[in-house]
Image: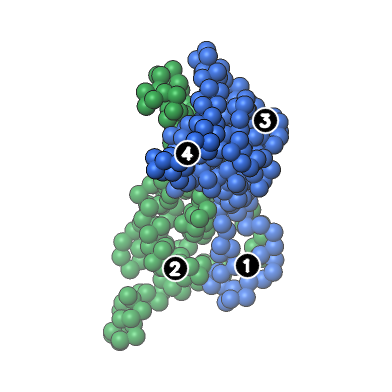
Chain colours: A green, B blue
Amino acid sequence: MAHIGSSVEYGLHCLLWLVEPPETPPSSRDLAEFQGVSPSFMAKIMPKLEKAGFVTASEGIRGGYRLARSPDKITVLDIVDALEGRKPLFDCQEIRGRCALYGGKPPARQLNGVCSIHAVMLRAEQSMRAELAGTTLADLAGVVGRKLPAGFAAQVQTWFSDRAAARIEARDAPDTPARKRRRR
Amino acid sequence: MAHIGSSVEYGLHCLLWLVEPPETPPSSRDLAEFQGVSPSFMAKIMPKLEKAGFVTASEGIRGGYRLARSPDKITVLDIVDALEGRKPLFDCQEIRGRCALYGGKPPARQLNGVCSIHAVMLRAEQSMRAELAGTTLADLAGVVGRKLPAGFAAQVQTWFSDRAAARIEARDAPDTPARKRRRR
């Protein structure tokens, strides 16, 4: 399994669609279906982003997610840490203290400071994190925006508005078994 | 699980003990028992290091492992790649092509080049790898050597020589059940 998992990919893609927010904030299911990914997986991702303060959720039939911060104040590293916790790149087992010559009692001097192998791994982790911290959601949105065809942003807005309208219509119309199923 | 696993930690520690090679080259079991780690795990690590060209193994009662290259020609990255393969930091699922607006047929333009999220992850991976490539086994041995107490290197040599001598004595002496058990 890769160190940075697909929850980060899905989370970042969702946040990108919130940079130019749809008029009615999209639900977790809207975001999942718009992107062709699992709604149940998305339903685990969005609350973590809310808890970490990157989105706010509003309740009710018109409720959904919005960014809680300016996109230039959200870095890729923020999202990795929010969605996956701060996983170490390397988990030092401190085998330097187990040398047979110490007979189970390593001298304190030998365990002082970080093991030199661990120190290299920590520097590598720091480089990786610095690179992730150097790109913001605003930077990503800029790159993605330049690749999208003309008129795409308007189509996105329409797709999310239609979804919100369909939810409201479904609430106001008499229930049918098919509608009940769709709401599940 | 951490991205860089304990096989790398164990492997690097083993290689460090081979920088000033014991007179009789240590076996995989010697290296494991000297460091207080699992002999069966070590028996999987050393052949990978041999296959990748970092150690050579000699056969027989006096056989064991030696470095196959100068320690300043072995980097931490070399050992990570040899022992764990080249695992990606991030495994892009290309969800950019699944957008509902494309109806299953994303325009080629949208899939051109690397996804901008993937691109950030690749830069982070490159930074991490550059840092790991910047430290050699010789660098590590220098740091570790400065921390070891005076006379330690001689004790290490004696420990490995005693092990080799015990193996030869066991081969030449009549078998006893206890010796048979030790050889297993």
- Report the disc number at residue A38: 2
Q: Residues within 10 Å of mark 3 (few under 14, many from 20)?
A: many
| Disc 1 to disc 4, C-alpha distance | 88 Å
Q: Label 1, on which residue?
A: A151
Q: Chain of mark 2?
A: A
| Disc 4 to disc 2, C-alpha distance | 68 Å
The amino acid marked with disc number 2 is Ser
Residue pictured at 53% horizontal, 22% vertical: B158
Foreground label between 1 and 4: 4
Foreground label between 2 and 3: 3
Q: Label 4, on which residue?
A: B174
Q: Label 3, on which residue?
A: B71
Residue pictured at 35% horizontal, 49% vertical: A51
SS state under label 4: loop
Tell me where residue B4 appears, x and y as whole percent: 52, 44
The amino acid marked with disc number 3 is Pro
Image position of B179 (left or right of B30): left
- The answer to whether A125 is drawn above or below residue A51 in the figure is above
- The answer to whether A86 is drawn above or below residue B15 in the figure is below
Q: Is residue A90 visible?
A: no
Mark 3 or 4 closer to N-term?
3
Tell me where residue B141 appears, x and y as whole percent: 60, 25
Residue B181 position by quadrant: top left
Q: Chain of mark 4?
A: B
Residue pictured at 35% horizontal, 74% vertical: A168
Label 1 and label 3 in one chain: no
